[in-house]
Amino acid sequence: SSGSRDEAQGDRRARILSRGLPKQKPIDGVKQVVVVASGKGGVGKSTTADILTNTFYFLFLTQTKEVGLLDADIYGPSIPKMMNLKGNPELTQKNLMRPLKNYGITCMSMGFLVEETAPVVWRGLMVMSAVEKLLRQVDWGQLDYLVVDMPPGTGDVQLSVSQNIPIAGAVIISTPQDVALLDARKGAEMFRKVQVPVLGLVQNMSVFQCPKCKHETHIFGANGVRDLAKTLGLDFLGDIPLHVNIREMCDSGQPVVISQPQSDA
């Protein structure tokens, strides 16, 4: 009797929880969504999202693939500067925002909707509403891939995006240092909990090469992300060096994949 009662309570709890979760609904016109995330800020997630998006476009250029980039970092949008885009989106006849475009990539960001120097001082509910609008009230056209640059952490935005739209996979970015790896692990585990496949880990700022003597220094440690990927049973997707060209090109809005495709970086 006690066992059947516990089983009934468990079934009831499961039904209540299932009712509380939003049903995933695809974004109109978007075939595949890939999110780029990190558990910690300052590890180069937006830079990597920028490189990844342009790599998608660069690799599929001959296959006429359409690629988009959504900057979901409401408080600190950086994609407009990295993609050299300014201006306010126009509205279509259906009252949808028309994304801006550069280098053949369709982009949308909170940075297009507020002044560049204006802080976004919002509470959680307003942020969630803004993310929903950036996802649903944008005329994305027909995209083969939409790369979403997520804000750092494992909070409301990450959960909302993961639970509201079908995601093909997540890419986790981290530097090799221990303090960043702790949060990267939490990020990977969060996506696993919400049933989002983790495509693998990228090690950013992996090595610095002196421009004069060519000596290589692992400023943030060596192989930390590679070891974490092995521990979690995930793929290690590669290294991105700490290189002045990458920083300069991102700051000038000329992604290194486009501006210097033959360089080591």
Image (cartoon, rainbow, N blue to C red):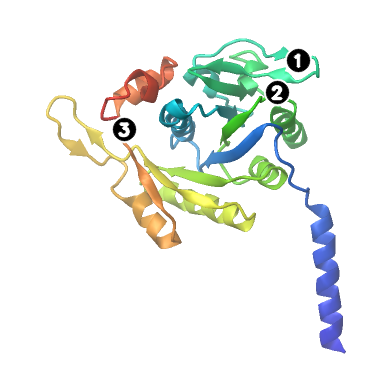
The residue that mark 1 highlights is 92
Q: Amino acid at mark 3?
A: Leu
**Up/down of 167 relative to 78, above or below:** below
Whether residue 73 appears in this view of the structure is no
Q: CA distance from mark 3 to mark 2?
A: 36 Å
Whether residue 207 appears in this view of the structure is yes
**Up/down of 214 relative to 252, above or below:** below
Q: Amino acid at mark 2?
A: Asp
Secondary element at tag 1: loop
Say whether disc 2 or disc 1 marks the residue closer to the N-terminus.
Answer: 1
The residue that mark 2 highlights is 139
Say whether disc 3 or disc 2 marks the residue closer to the N-terminus.
Answer: 2
Q: Are marks 2 and 1 in contact (CB under 8 Å)?
A: yes
Say whether disc 3 or disc 1 marks the residue closer to the N-terminus.
Answer: 1
Q: Amino acid at mark 1?
A: Thr
The spot of residue 75 in percent (x, y) is: 62, 28
Secondary element at tag 3: loop
Q: Are marks 3 and 1 in contact (CB under 8 Å)?
A: no
Q: CA distance from mark 3 to mark 1?
A: 41 Å
The residue that mark 3 highlights is 242
Q: Quadrant of residue 92?
A: top right
**Is disc 2 surrounded by few (<14), some (14 to 19) or many (20+) residues within 10 Å?**
many
Mark 3, mark 1: which one is toward the viewer? 1
Q: Residue at x 64, y 54 (%)?
A: 194
Q: CA distance from mark 2 to mark 1?
A: 8 Å
The spot of residue 257 in percent (x, y) is: 37, 25
